[in-house]
Image: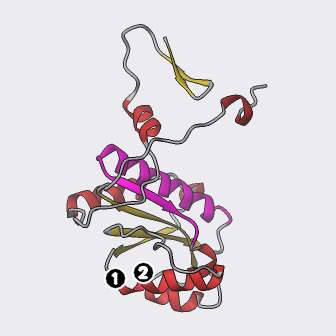
Amino acid sequence: MPVQAGRGVILCLREGEKMNEVLQTIKKRSSIRAYKAEKLTKEELDALIAAGLQAPTAANRQEIHFTVVDGDNPILSEVEEEKNAFRGLRPRFNFYYDAPTVIFISADTDFHWGTLDAGIAVENISLAAQSMGLGSLIIGCIYEALNGDRADYFREKLAIPDGYRFEIAIALGRRDTEKEPHEYDFDKNVTIL
């Protein structure tokens, strides 16, 4: 029997078959914007980092770097202030929604595929978090702030290696809210030739 998502069929199953565990994880993942204060365990954090490190990279260059930041580290407030100043925003909420852990992913500026590789790694981490019962939020809204006039300062504070730049981040923690996965329009977003 077909499994429906929006207007499109995402997977055809034979009667009595269960959906593949990975596909279930993808289907259930959503962006979480409220977290409990409880920290991740070392085992949870190690598993999430391993998921990011196991992501494929172009030509197996493995040119991405992870900076793990505790949710109460003052650098997060500085990043938030810079984001607000850059975008001309008044403070409403912080970019990581008080998650207990934020991972900043940077890539080698000399490698053309670094941005894409960082995106693949962040998706691996997000799906791993979902499979572990954790919440995550992929964060791009701080890109300009971290690569703007104060880029050198933030590279130093976030221990981003020389020759690398910030690409994307992810907030991680135990959910303090639930959110349905987003809807999509298969017919609008997909062309099959």
Location of residue 153 with respect to 68 vertically, above or below? below
**Is residue 54 at all visible to an observer of this figure?**
no
| Residue drawn at point x = 41 percent, y = 58 percent | 53
| Residue drawn at point x = 43 percent, y = 69 percent | 96
Report the number of numbered marks: 2
Disc assigned to residue 73: 1
Q: State yes or no: discs 1 and 2 in contact (Cβ < 8 Å).
A: yes
Location of residue 135 with respect to 7 vertically, above or below? below
Residue range of the region highlighted in magenta in the rendering: 112-141
| Residue drawn at point x = 48 percent, y = 71 percent | 95
Q: CA distance from mark 1 to mark 2?
A: 6 Å
Check if residue 118 falls in the magenta segment.
Answer: yes
| Residue drawn at point x = 45 percent, y = 41 percent | 180
- Label 1: state its secondary structure: loop
**How many other residues sit within 10 Å of disc 1, few (<14), some (14-19) or many (≥20)?**
few
Q: Which residue is mark 2?
A: 76
**What amino acid type should be assigned to the residue bearing mark 2?**
Leu
**How many other residues sit within 10 Å of disc 2, few (<14), some (14-19) or many (≥20)?**
some
**What amino acid type should be assigned to the residue bearing mark 1?**
Asn
